[in-house]
Amino acid sequence: MDRTGANTPPPIQHVLRPHHIDLIALFLLVFKEFQKKLPSSFLLQVYRLLLEEVSEVATHKLRPELLNELKQTPEADEDQARNLITALETLPSQLDSADKLNNFFHSMPVMFVDKSEDESRRSLFGFFCRRCFISFLKLSWYSVCHLHADYQSYTLGQYESGYGPFEKDYLTQDIWIFKTGFDIKSWARPEPLAAAGKGLASGDSILGPENLRRYFEQHFHDHPDSGVRQHALLYLARMHFARGETASVRNLLQEAISVARGVGDRYTLQQCTSLINRLPSPTPVLTEIQPDVHPADVLHDVAKLMNPENGQPLMSAFEKLFQAAGLYDYWFESRRNMVQDWESRSLHSMQAVLWESVGCVGLAEVEEDMVSAFVERIPDVNRKSVTLNRVRRLARNGAYEEALASILHTDTWMTLNHTQYVEWAEQVWHVLAIRAIRRGQHQLFNNYLKPRRPSSTNVSEYIFDDVSAPKLGSIRAELHEVIRARHHGQAVAAIQPLLQALWLSEFQCRFPLYRLGVILLADVGLEFGLTEYCRRLLEEVLPQMRKGDDVEHRALAYFTYARCLVACSPSGSGEGLREALVYLKMAEEDYKRLELAESLADVQFLMSVVYHNLGETSESEQTGERHLETNALMQKHGEVLVDEEVSRIWEIVSRVGISIAGQSSDPH
């Protein structure tokens, strides 16, 4: 097929539908009855409307929509324009019989001029009129009466009349007077592919493949080999890839590669090879840049390099990202395949993730704003990813209400398909889970949230004592072991995984995790009396954390640094204690913002002790009262079994899932 669209033959199958009669009437009115009489602005809009309808690049407008658009055009109140609209409105009453419909079509030849076969087509309008006229000439009187009845029903609001499936066979003889070879066979139609897309969006594992099979089993041309089997296999492979069914993807792609090689389809062969490289494997393979490689495949290599399990520094991911940007420019400049604006925004989306992994949250927010500002509110994976990343960051920093308002907004979930819905529901669950754990609502988490968690969510991100939970990635797994050891008072057991996490995070340029490792190293060092060393460690990272890109890490750093100042303060000296109070107050504010009750109680207890040692009895008592209130709130939260707000939110999540699952429908 010629990708440029030049010299592409028109569609072989043409069936007269009721809306074609309205379009033909509009042509006759504009180019015959009201020729050179209509206002220029009105005529320009009519040309645009006809061009859109004749090109059939979108679903045709219904009769009321067509009339309303004509009435809303500039200068539609002029006398001649109003007369044209009135004539179109009264068309059904003028065509009140099959004879009049027959005469109506036979008045069409004035709209086109016969030409020699050597001349190329010049007028899309004339081609449309000539094609409709020829299709009408072939119809039998029975078919003309049937078309007239369908048009009258259509004008009365029965918009399905005349738009049913039209099957051709060798035996049917009452439809046409003149029957050509093209009228014997039914040619390929796009409806099964649209139904397959609905099945993919709703997660229907039966509707999608079955309609896809129906689509590619249609009659495309007269050659013995359809030449499109590799496309069907690639489409199925992509559908299974979106669901994470790697075994099915690998089998389908291997078959598609063999078929593509057999028919010499180099472009599809490259797509199959790139997709098979995306599958997880013990030794991931990076895509070799070639002219037919899509930039999205190179961007997927960035995701591979970002995986901590592969042990690569993030600088290599940035290098691969620059290669993807160059490939986008090459595709655009060489005009091999026009790259849509929303596709190029995936570069900004990936950069946002990269900058956040490095620790430059400000730059990540700039890249996210680029995606949000220039991508329309359409089903776009980049906008969805940016929204979910923002929601996760808001939840980590204690803005739970804002995070829930953003993720539950209609614009966020309205256009999700089944696969995207799973990710969306996971993020909603994440916000609810992290809030419940920080508040100390362990019964709510264990009895309500935990049984409803998405399968891809790792419980180890929220609790430390669940030995049945799968391990996290390499660096996070080491830090998880450190926190778990400290949680049980085993400082010695925390040293080895802590040093391993520090080395890996520094080598891979994951500086947020590296700074967290430094804080935990200082915390462990205090257990061994290394107070001065721990204080110097924290003084190196505190300036990088004051901005509050991660409020929980900052609060932990302030609390740990205050403990170092208290431990380093000479006996009888209040200067170190007063300096520690400054950081304890900031840590208390951060933990209040996070609603992290257990850590807040620890900070308030130490503040009360410091005030007592400074002789400030009233402040010590006030802090002690806040400590008791925090403990009472923790006990109250610990008794909560079901939260009404959480139940309502999860009910919304369930209804959205039901709505998405109900979107699939087989039109045949």
Image (spheres, helix red, strand yellow):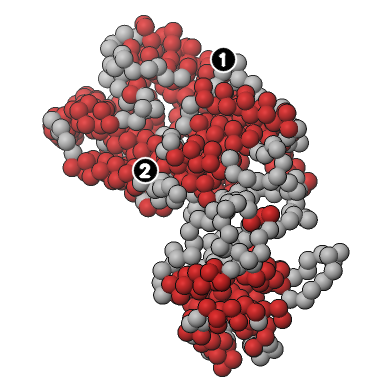
Occupied quadrant, residue 103:
bottom right
Which residue, given by chain and number where applicable, does mark 2 sit on?
661
Q: Which residue sits furthest right?
A: 118
Q: Residue at x 62, y 61 (%)?
A: 14
**Of labels 2 and 1, the one closer to you:** 2
Percent across and percent down for residue 495 are 41, 9
For residue 76, above or below residue 134: below
Front one among 113 and 509: 113
Q: Residue at x 68, y 29 (%)?
A: 259
Q: Earlier in the sequence, mark 2 or mark 1?
A: 1
**Label 1 packing within 10 angstroms: few (<14), some (14-19), many (20+):** few
**Label 2 packing within 10 angstroms: few (<14), some (14-19), many (20+):** some
Q: Residue at x 15, y 33 (%)?
A: 640
Percent across and percent down for residue 655 are 29, 45
Which residue, given by chain and number where applicable, does mark 1 sit on?
282
Type of the residue with mark 2: Ala
For residue 95, above or below residue 576: below
Percent across and percent down for residue 393 are 41, 38
- Left or right: where 143 falls relative to 55: left
Occupied quadrant, residue 441:
top left
Q: Residue at x 73, y 56 (%)?
A: 9
